[in-house]
Amino acid sequence: MDNETTAAGAEQFRPVFRSYVAVGDSFTEGMCDELLPDGHYRGWADRVAAALAAERPGEEFRYANLAVRGKLIGQIHREQIADAAAMGGELVTLAGGLNDVLRPGCDIEQVERLLGAAAETLLAGGAGEGTVVMFTSTDPTRRLAGSARLLPAILRMKGYVEGLAKQHPRLRVVDLFSAPCFDDRRLWDEDRLHLSPEGHRRVAAAVLEALGRPAGFDWRAPLPPAAPRGRAERIRADLHWLRLHLGPWLGRRLTGRSSGDGRPPKRAELLPYES
């Protein structure tokens, strides 16, 4: 899906939304964006909600975010989708499956089945007139050593999501895979898995563009060149990452735990949004 095709399609697709429901995992929860006064991360979904609410000054705009970090697609399907569909949001964003892909032995066919079933349920939710936005993953091989094993599954998911969009005119796809700006480490937190504030800002702009909103900036544009890092600095960063991030992640995998265990969604109800 090239940028010109995406932009042309978006220009023909500019509904005004009165409600928005976000479902997914840490990507949608907003991990590693700036912290809000209530202790939650802001995240790209909150940024999208703020932009859509600003289109309706003096009118009510409602927003729910059911996403919880660490969730697999089966958990998202089981714990979030029915509730999201029942809310009848005029806009729903759905992101999931990458946590499954990160685990050895991922059943990619099952991931696709559950992702497709979730999309179908959300498209039929409410009065069956809402818009659903889905995503293609960024390409980890361009920035993470040892991630080549993930690429076949990521490409399959990309093709699957784009195929769903061809079947459903109310389903839009945000193509992050084809945006080289996400190769830049500055768009990622130091854990190398979650977006930085700048990464969240760009994903929010990409979602709004997919919904036909005029771009406030070119979210695909590269950042200014970064100062080169010496070998010693790179080694220190890698050791820091191994100790503080990769080690604990592997520990949770080995013990069957998740960073989202027992954690409630940050906005479990579809309530008026206040920036």
Image: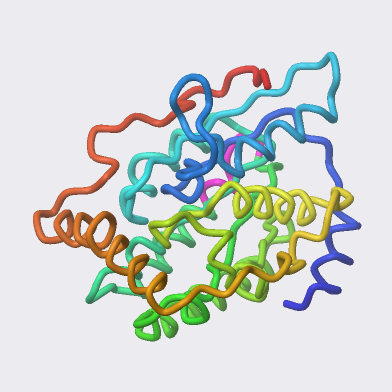
209 lies above or below 40: below
Give the farthest residue toward the top: 58
220 lies above or below 12: below
118 lies above or below 102: above
261 lies above or below 213: above
Which residue shows up at 74% across the image and 28% down it? 18
Q: Is residue 125 magenta?
A: yes
Front residue (pair 234, 18): 234
Quarter-wise, where is residue 252 in the image?
A: bottom left
Which residue shows up at 58% across the image and 36% down it? 21
Q: Residue 34's spot in the image, x, y percent?
A: 54, 37
Give the farthest residue toward the left: 255
Which residue shows up at 50% across the image and 22% down it? 269
Quarter-wise, where is residue 256 in the image?
A: bottom left
Q: In which quadrant will I find the C terminus?
A: top right
Q: Residue 259's spot in the image, x, y percent?
A: 27, 45
13 horizontally vs 203: left or right: right
Please count the marks in the image: 0
Question: Magenta residues?
Answer: 121-127
Which residue shows up at 52% across the image and 38% down it? 85
240 horizontally vs 27: left or right: left
130 horizontally vs 251: left or right: right
Front residue (pair 186, 146): 186
Q: Is residue 62 magenta?
A: no
Q: Residue 258's spot in the image, x, y percent?
A: 23, 48
Front residue (pair 89, 232): 232
Quarter-wise, where is residue 53 in the image?
A: top right
Q: In which quadrant will I find the N terminus?
A: bottom right
Q: How is the image coloured?
A: rainbow
Q: Residue 118's spot in the image, x, y percent?
A: 47, 53
Front residue (pair 80, 238): 238
